[in-house]
Image (cartoon, grey):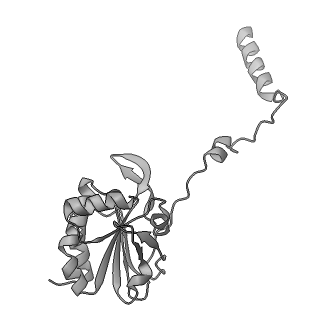
Amino acid sequence: MIAVIVVIRSLVDSLSAPPPKGRPTPPLGSGRVRERFPRRAMSERLQPGDTAPAFTLPDADGNEVSLADHLGRKVIVYFYPAALTPGCTKQACDFTDNLELLAGAGYDVIGVSPDKPEKLAKFREKEDLKVTLVGDPEKKVLEAYGAFGEKKLYGKTVTGVIRSTVVVDEEGKVERALYNVKATGHVAKIIRDLGVEA
């Protein structure tokens, strides 16, 4: 019994003792680790009626492509994680296969990924893609469109590109904003939802 009291008393004394001299102890929750490694702010998702963020990005040939170049036409801007991967290839091929149909209904299509132009050029050549592909290695446009942040991947929470599609109207306003879309069947669903007929 006496031994237990001695142990408890020494614990109480150690907890109430002043911190050692030198660097002051930060208040609980101040988190020096957080200061050294700041948490990346989550990008906000766009809503219908928002002004679509302007962008100018390099395409597969290194030429600049701007959203402003498409003013007066509707634009489907789709965001995908990486060129030359199975799901992203399926999606890009589906858009390419339906490009003529979408163009006839007044829609241009731009695919955005964090890839560099060289990789986009390989992707385009390997899959014979006709869709415009642009690279955003700094992820600024991805973040501006709410297409970069936390997502579930094989049951784990990771930070990365969120597969998304934003439809921009002729005046540069967001008509639709779809997040966490599936690669397979997404293009067919968009065509149906937009009322585009073959």
Name above or below for residue 104 compared with residue 54: below
Name above or below for residue 146 compared with residue 31: below
Image position of 22 (left or right of 132): right
**Residue in view at x 35 percent, y 49 percent:** 153
Q: How many marks?
A: 0
Residue 101 lies in what quarter of the image? Answer: bottom left
**Residue in view at x 27 percent, y 59 percent:** 123
Name above or below for residue 170 compared with residue 125: below
Residue 122 versus residue 132: which sits nearer the camera? Answer: 122
Residue 45, image x, y percentages: 46, 68
Q: Quadrant of the C terminus?
A: bottom left
Residue 57, image x, y percentages: 43, 70
**Residue in view at x 26 percent, y 78 percent:** 193
Residue 165, image x, y percentages: 35, 70
Of all residues shown, which one is farthest toward the left?
Answer: 198
Residue 155, image x, y percentages: 35, 46
Is any part of residue 198 visible from this angle? yes
Image position of 130 (left or right of 10): left
Image position of 160 (left or right of 80): right
Residue 62 versus residue 6: which sits nearer the camera? Answer: 62
Of all residues shown, which one is farthest toward the top?
Answer: 2
Residue 175 lies in what quarter of the image? Answer: bottom left
Residue 34 versus residue 71: which sits nearer the camera? Answer: 71
Q: Quadrant of the N terminus?
A: top right
**Residue in view at x 83 percent, y 30 percent:** 22
Image position of 119 (left or right of 9): left
Is any part of residue 183 visible from this angle? no
